[in-house]
Image (cartoon, rainbow, N blue to C red):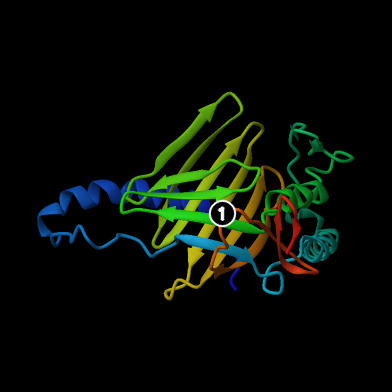
Amino acid sequence: MFRHDTSVITAVLWLSLALAMPLQAADSDNLQVLDLDQPLRLDFSGFWEKDFRRSDDWQDELNRNLRMRQEAAARQSANPGAGRRVTMPPISIGNINLNRVGGRGVNIIDLARLAEYISRQTTLQISQTRDEIRIERRNDSTLVCGTGWEVMQTFASEYGVEACGWDGQQLVFQTMLPDDLVIVHRFNVSADGQLLNLIISVISKGAESFDLIQAFNRYDAPPDEFNCEQTLSRGRVCSQSGGSL
């Protein structure tokens, strides 16, 4: 699995999508006629359960990030003129503190905790039509995007702005929060439609992004009367009003 410099890729994504639209309009006479019975995108629809073996563990990724920062700090100490860290104003989201720590910039541990909280979903339900895709998450908002070429703004308020778009066959949601905090969800499905990868990135001005890769497998959903959850120790656990399966 590949890792990205997400802050750069995200900026390039929106720019490239914005630039692509007029070009597509200009070349519309040369485009083939679309078959309305064929979807524009790969099929993301279905029920998905987390594959813990293939998914990143947030503590392992945090340790990796800390080692990389220590190595970078050692290099900077050896060459003090090479660069200077940029600090940023305090940030808070809900009960997760993202304040500056000792004047040295955003606390990577808090960024990791936020990424871990965002990645808590163990199952996803995705429905898809030719024009729209909906990603339902338990106890969280539903992610909705079109399947066309344009970048869509899906939410805007004083608390932040969310937009979505497509980078090739990858579906990207970008949420821009106050104080230059950005959360990116990047979904990618395999050609055979059996594997789903989700890269969650938390990006903060003055700090490197923290990324978590979450892997999901397609599964056949049980009847509606059962409530199922994927667990690390027991696999899929389904409960009914009268007990558990």
Give how far across and how far down residue 90 sits, in percent: 77, 32
Q: Nearer the viewer, residue 235 or 29?
A: 235
Give how far across and how far down residue 185 sits, in percent: 56, 52
Res. 50 in view: yes
User: Is disc 1 surrounded by few (<14), some (14 to 19) or many (20+) residues within 10 Å?
Assistant: few
Residue appearing at x 38%, y 52% in the figure: 16
Residue appearing at x 53%, y 68% in the figure: 220
Q: Is residue 43 left or right of residue 38?
A: right
Give how far across and how far down residue 163 sits, in percent: 47, 41
**194 w.r.t. 37: above or below:** below
The residue labelled by disc 1 is 224
Helix, strand or loop for disc 1 = loop
**139 w.r.t. 69: above or below:** above
Give how far across and how far down residue 240 sits, in percent: 70, 54
Q: Nearer the viewer, residue 17 or 72?
A: 17
Q: What amino acid type is highlighted by mark number 1?
A: Asp
**65 w.r.t. 15: above or below:** below
Res. 84 in view: no
Q: Is residue 107 left or right of residue 13?
A: right
Q: Is residue 84 left or right of residue 2?
A: right
Q: Nearer the viewer, residue 18 or 120?
A: 120
Q: Nearer the viewer, residue 160 or 80?
A: 160
